[in-house]
């Protein structure tokens, strides 16, 4: 791709194209028209998609427009643009492109996608897109050959985004299913799915029986210790940055210097894989210390020091299992900000495999699942950011 500097060429474009883009009114590029009312012959199992303001919702046994088509919202939901590859019926809450002229339909779809149509909201209570305002805008477009390249590029990006979305979604669903099947349910003494080589009943006992100590610095603040927070240093872990399954380092948080760290964390230093639990605002987020770095355990978060009879990886999974989440939610108190105390935690019971090796295998399995989920989520976010940047830089 080559860089463009002229106001009538995009910042980034494909090699082989150098001529300036042509400026036209939007209604000369791809005019919009209101969709149609649905007749009483609507059937949900029809063969032709019906496109509403917020996308394709159901099928119809007739069609009004020949595909491919580009549809966007007219009323209710505006700003969303839908590409339809087949014959379709644009609903009266939508606007559809009536004429592509010599323009590539796929290019027109991405043209309207980057156009940010929701800025033309003419409604008060109900968002409404005024197509006359859109049509009056002058925009630049490239030749048909360059349009094809642009459309194909973004189509491939969307394919990759969809691929990672599906993989991420399947992994999340797999995790939820395995959290049900790998823990005993409804009074059972063994789980539905179990690793080979392990047998015998799981044991019901108090959650904290295998916990040596709960590290809880509730109410502790730097000022009470004669210090203050610092602009850098040791990161304070709190309900602010302890998320469900990970530490969010992007959140603006507090830091403590060496003196504060030594005074605050004296004899209670956290270690890699140690389990953290947020007690309120929000209650129930579970994460593990990700590395060998030093951290300050701050407000609304506790840490568990476990005995040798309990795997830390297993405890992290157990606290996020559906049955345990329901138990903790039932114990939580408070109005707007739900919370759970250390005292109430001491009354919670759960089923545990006696063999620590089985505990560790379960913990490792879910750790690997979380790693895959995180990998696809990260890749998905990168692709979305790439698409957003390219939509900015590949159109004039």
Image (spheres, rainbow, N blue to C red):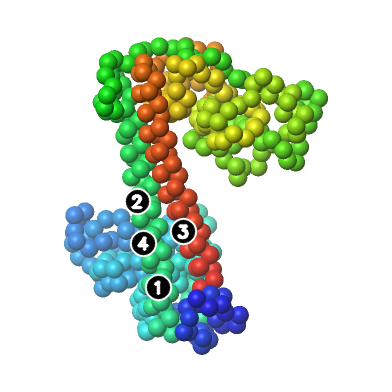
Find residue 172 and report its image quarter: top left
Q: CA distance from mark 4 to mark 1?
A: 12 Å
Residue at left offset 51%, top offset 59%: 385
Residue 173 versus residue 363 in the image, above or below: below
* N-term-proximal mark, 3 vs 4: 4
Helix, strand or loop at disc 3?
A: helix
Q: Compare residues 166 and 262 and report the one nearer the observer.
A: 262
Give 67 or 28, whichever is nearer the viewer.
67
Of badges 4 and 1, the one in the foreground is 4
Residue 198 percent across, percent down from the top left? 28, 22
* Residue at image mark 3: 383
For the residues marked 2 and 3, what is the alpha-carbon distance in whole angstroms? Answer: 14 Å
Q: Which residue is mark 4?
A: 159
Residue 143's x, y, as percent? Answer: 43, 85
Q: Residues within 10 Å of mark 3 (few under 14, many from 20)?
A: some
Q: Pointer 2: what residue?
A: 166
Q: Residue at x 54, y 21 (%)?
A: 304
Q: CA distance from mark 2 to mark 1?
A: 22 Å
Q: Which SS class for mark 4? A: helix
Considering only vertical position in the picture, is 158 above or below 395?
A: above
């Amino acid at each position: 791709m080559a860089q463009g500097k002229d106001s009538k060429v995009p910042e980034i474009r494909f090699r082989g194209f150098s001529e300036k883009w042509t400026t036209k009114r939007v209604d000369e590029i791809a005019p919009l028209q209101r969709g149609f009312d649905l007749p009483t012959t609507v059937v949900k199992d029809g063969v032709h998609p019906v496109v509403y303001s917020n996308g394709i919702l159901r099928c119809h046994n007739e069609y009004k427009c020949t595909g491919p088509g580009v549809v966007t919202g007219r009323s209710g939901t505006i700003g969303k643009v839908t590409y339809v590859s087949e014959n379709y019926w644009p609903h009266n809450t939508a606007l559809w492109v009536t004429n592509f002229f010599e323009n590539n339909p796929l290019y027109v779809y991405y043209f309207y996608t980057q156009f940010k149509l929701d800025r033309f909201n003419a409604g008060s209570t109900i968002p409404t897109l005024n197509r006359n305002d859109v049509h009056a805008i002058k925009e630049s477009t490239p030749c048909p050959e360059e349009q094809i390249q642009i459309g194909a590029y973004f189509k491939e990006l969307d394919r990759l985004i969809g691929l990672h979305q599906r993989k991420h979604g399947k992994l999340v669903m797999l995790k939820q299913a395995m959290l049900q099947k790998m823990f005993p349910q409804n009074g059972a003494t063994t789980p539905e799915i179990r690793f080979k080589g392990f047998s015998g009943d799981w044991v019901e006992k108090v959650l904290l029986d295998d916990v040596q100590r709960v590290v809880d610095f509730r109410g502790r603040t730097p000022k009470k210790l004669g210090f203050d927070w610092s602009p850098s240093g040791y990161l304070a872990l709190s309900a602010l940055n302890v998320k469900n399954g990970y530490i969010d380092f992007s959140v603006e948080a507090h830091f403590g210097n060496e003196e504060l760290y030594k005074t605050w964390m004296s004899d209670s230093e956290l270690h890699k894989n140690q389990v953290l639990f947020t007690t309120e605002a929000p209650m129930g987020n579970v994460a593990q210390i990700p590395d060998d770095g030093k951290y300050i355990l701050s407000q609304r978060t506790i840490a568990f020091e476990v005995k040798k009879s309990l795997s830390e990886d297993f405890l992290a999974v157990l606290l996020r299992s559906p049955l345990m989440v329901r138990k903790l939610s039932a114990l939580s108190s408070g109005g707007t900000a739900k919370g759970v105390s250390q005292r109430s935690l001491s009354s919670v019971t759960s089923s545990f495999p006696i063999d620590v090796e089985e505990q560790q295998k379960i913990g490792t399995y879910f750790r690997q699942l979380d790693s895959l989920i995180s990998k696809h989520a990260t890749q998905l976010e990168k692709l979305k950011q790439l698409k957003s940047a390219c939509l900015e830089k590949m159109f004039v």
